[in-house]
Amino acid sequence: MFEPSRLNTSLPESITSFGRLLRAGGLKVGTAEIINAIEAVELVGVAEKDLFKWALQGTLITKHESVPFFDWAFDIFWQDPGRTGRAAVLLKKLAARKALTGTHSEPTARQPHSTARSSATGRGKSADRDDGSGVSQTSAYSADESLKQKHFEQFTEDDMRMAVEFLKQAKFNSGMRSSRRYTPGHRQIRLDLQKTIRKNALQNRDFIKLAWKQRKIKPRPVVILSDISGSMERYSRILLHFMHTLSRQIKTMEAFTFGTRLTRITHQIRSGDIEVAMGRISADVKDWNGGTRMGAALETFNRIWARRTLGNGAIVILISDGWDTGNNELLKSEMGRLQRSCHRLIWLNPNIGYDTFEPLTRGVLTLLPFADEFLPVHNLQSLLDLSRVLAGIGSSNTRAKGILPHSDNFGAYS
């Protein structure tokens, strides 16, 4: 068939590129399938074309109806060891024919990623490169994983659309709290005297059957205070999408934005259509991309909204990079008041996502002592990590201090 020594890339990388082309054509070929294909080829070798083809087909194809498409793609891709331009030809034909079975979607060219990644089996590393086909000849890795790790500030419009769809599928909850009300239960916590009397009043027996009750468990309310000043411009859009997703899953959520003033956007963010919600928020919020007077905004919240929103063991999520141009003493006072009024105060800072981050600005040093959790919010993975933190907040009313991440970078402030 061909000599491995004639390939422009290593055999694992060639199989990886072939797998990515199959995936672009609509087949469900993931990282696990590609790794299996590489291992199978290592066992059978490449001396015999039929064995080589069967090894790839047996590991990359899971449905019988996909075999004709695989055969066609195999002949085009592997007929020439110097595959410059071959992938482009394949993609053009895929776009024209879609698939021999009529079940495959049009392929879309993937953007090359700047980060060097190792091959699917860990053998050697090479930087991403494109041979003109629109398919990056690198090791296979999950597109979802790549998107989850990508910084928000590097998002393209395509990335944003995929991220919005990703957030729609994500699951968030706010942990649970103990209610003042009771419900029937089996644990011997509190005697239900009335039910005990009713159950035993007409019974003629020598013993009394006791009935018990326990406190109801309810989701904790969540209050989000999001910074929309100029320094947060790169993150505001995706974070509003996150808030919209959260509002659909947590019914007791309140949302506010702040820059130079505080604006409540709870009703706007709860709109079923995200585009409608964005339009309403854009019309109602007047301080986009301006300065930051966080102390004044928190003072307004504490004075007007705290009593209405922070009952029942609420969790407050503060989203800000910590840059503040207002009164530092006011910020310190109002932040302390906010922390004392809620069950847990979580500060999300996009700058923590950078290894070089150090908490040296005045605003960060002022806010940091009041944060129960200090977490990054620079990519989708950080939002998934936040969901686990929220879900892990139990029903106890005891405030538990979280561990600050990246403690090596914080020095004495950690």
Image (spheres, rainbow, N blue to C red):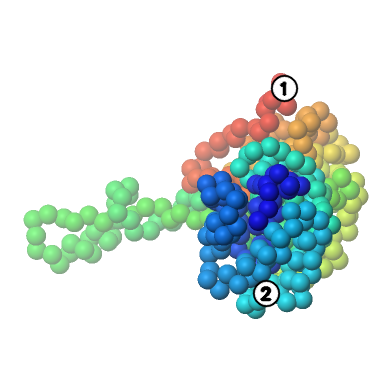
296 sits to left or right of 125: right
Decide which of 230, 293 is in the foreground and name it: 230
Spot occupied by residue 223 in the image (x, y as percentages of width and height)? 67, 52
On-image quarter of the N terminus: bottom right
Q: Is residue 329 above or below residue 71?
A: above
242 sits to left or right of 230: left
Q: Is residue 239 above or below residue 294?
A: below
Quarter of the image for residue 56 reads bottom right
Quarter of the image for residue 360 reads top right
Q: Residues within 10 Å of mark 2 (few under 14, many from 20)?
A: many
Decide which of 276, 285 is in the foreground and name it: 276
What's the residue type where badge 1 is placed? Gly
Decide which of 236, 69 is in the foreground and name it: 69
Residue matched to label 2:
99
Q: Which mark is residue 411?
A: 1
17 sits to left or right of 40: right
Spot occupied by residue 31 in the image (x, y as percentages of width and height)? 61, 52
Q: Which mark is residue 44?
A: none
Disc 1 to disc 2, how far (Cα)?
Answer: 58 Å
Q: Residues within 10 Å of mark 1 (few under 14, many from 20)?
A: few
Q: Who's the residue at 59% across and 34% down the image?
A: 401
Callout 1: SS = helix
Q: Is residue 238 above or below residue 123?
A: below
Spot occupied by residue 394 in the image (x, y as percentages of width and height)? 50, 45
Q: Earlier in the sequence, mark 1 or mark 2?
A: 2
Q: Is residue 200 visible?
A: yes
Decide which of 408, 51 is in the foreground and name it: 51
Quarter of the image for residue 400 reads top right
Q: Who's the residue at 58% across and 54% down the image?
A: 48
